[in-house]
Image: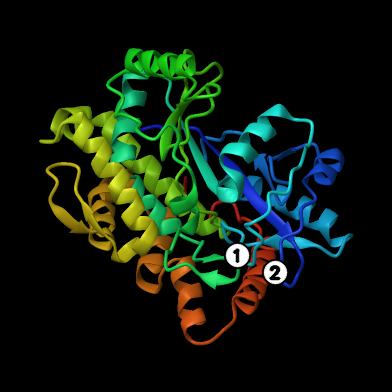
Amino acid sequence: MKKKLLSKGFEVELFTGLPSGEHVGVSAGVKRDLPEFVIEPDHRNLEYITVPEFSYLPLKEALLAPRRRLRKWLLEKNLTLLPGSTLSLGNSKCFERSDLLNPYHDFIEANYGTRVVTASIHINLGIKDLSLLFAAIRLVRCEAALFLAMSASSPFLDGIATGAHSQRWLQFPLTPENVPLFVNHDHYVEWVERHLESGHMLNERHLWTSVRPNGPRRPYELNRLELRICDLITNPEILLAVTAFLEVRVLSLLHNPDQLDPLRVSTLTPHELSVLSDTNDANAAKKSFDANLQHWRDGRPILCRTWIEELLDEVRPLAMELGLLERLAPLQDVLIKGNQAMHWLKAFSSGMPVSEILQEGIVCMNAEESSVSKPGVILG
């Protein structure tokens, strides 16, 4: 019997600005006229959320349709959508409030400032069985660096190259600082309640880590895994390939928890695994595919690119069974040619100014939205 796919949904954060690449905040106006969009504390970025789907066929249009509507609104004001996940041309010295009367925004500005003014993709996979959900969260936490490497698109900040491939992840405040590898749902509930009581978390959403459980009433009612580490991936085919890779990896665990749950398989302690994962994430943010990582099974060193290639080979039989092999194909191209950050840094090292790099990215992002899915071309 053919194995079933999981439900998939996205939270997409975007920057708005001028065709020249400078950021301009208009989120309050967008929210007024396009209620599907959600404002962030700084008005230079905003968010939309897609409806969960099991099949991949409607996902591309679900990702692009809101962008087209937003672009049309922006065009009337001589504005556009900007690629990248940081304030590439600035100004990171100034926090530009979207709602001066919102006390939560007071807290964000006072405690984090523009460190949180970023754009990213959050990928949600539906998993209702809590024991399997937390096993999946453990595996994805231990491999999150690989997904950051594939998505890295933020090498610039304030008009300069920072030396990182994902400046976003290096600057974004992981909160609380030390998040354990959750053993089960009870462990997660107890930990969240304790941190809410101590004030280390402002509310149940104030858990900013590479991956977390999500659901209608956190921490008590949960129904999905949320991968939060990815930079903004504007190309829908690459985003769907990353999503398919994540899904096939999680499904591999759901079918074989004794072989893939780090809590059962790794020679490292849960604390050592959480430290290893955070260290891997930081290293992937700096060098993406060329980062030296440590494998969660035994702590052995492994090159990020090699690890991804090994996992792609490992999931190939299941991907074929699920009809997702073609969905994964764009990842081979990314591994060979490089991610967004690598392309941009190559252009920058050749002498192209950040502003021109951004302007080329704006044109490419616009072209992506003219692409329409053709049902039946790719399975899944």
Q: Position of residue 177 (x, y in %)?
A: 39, 35
Q: In the rendered image, which residue does mark 2 sit on?
A: 21
Disc 2: CA contacts within 10 A as few (<14), some (14-19) or many (>=20): many
Quadrant in which residue 188 is drawn: top left
Query: CA separation, marks 1 and 2?
Result: 8 Å
The answer to whether any part of residue 378 appears in the image is no
Q: Is residue 10 above or below residue 304?
A: above
Residue type for callout 1: Ser
Quadrant in which residue 139 is drawn: top left
Q: Position of residue 184 (x, y in %)?
A: 30, 18
Q: Is residue 342 left or right of residue 289?
A: right
Residue occupying the point 57% across, 38% down: 111
Residue type for callout 2: Gly
The answer to whether any part of residue 347 appears in the image is yes
Residue occupying the point 68% across, 54% down: 94
In contact (CB < 8 Å): disc 1 and disc 2: yes
Q: Position of residue 120 (x, y in %)?
A: 55, 49
Q: In the rendered image, which residue does mark 1 sit on?
A: 88
Q: Is residue 136 left or right of residue 62?
A: left
Quadrant in which residue 2 is drawn: top left
Furthest toward the bottom, the residue is 351
Judging from the image, what secondary structure is the residue with disc 2 in? loop
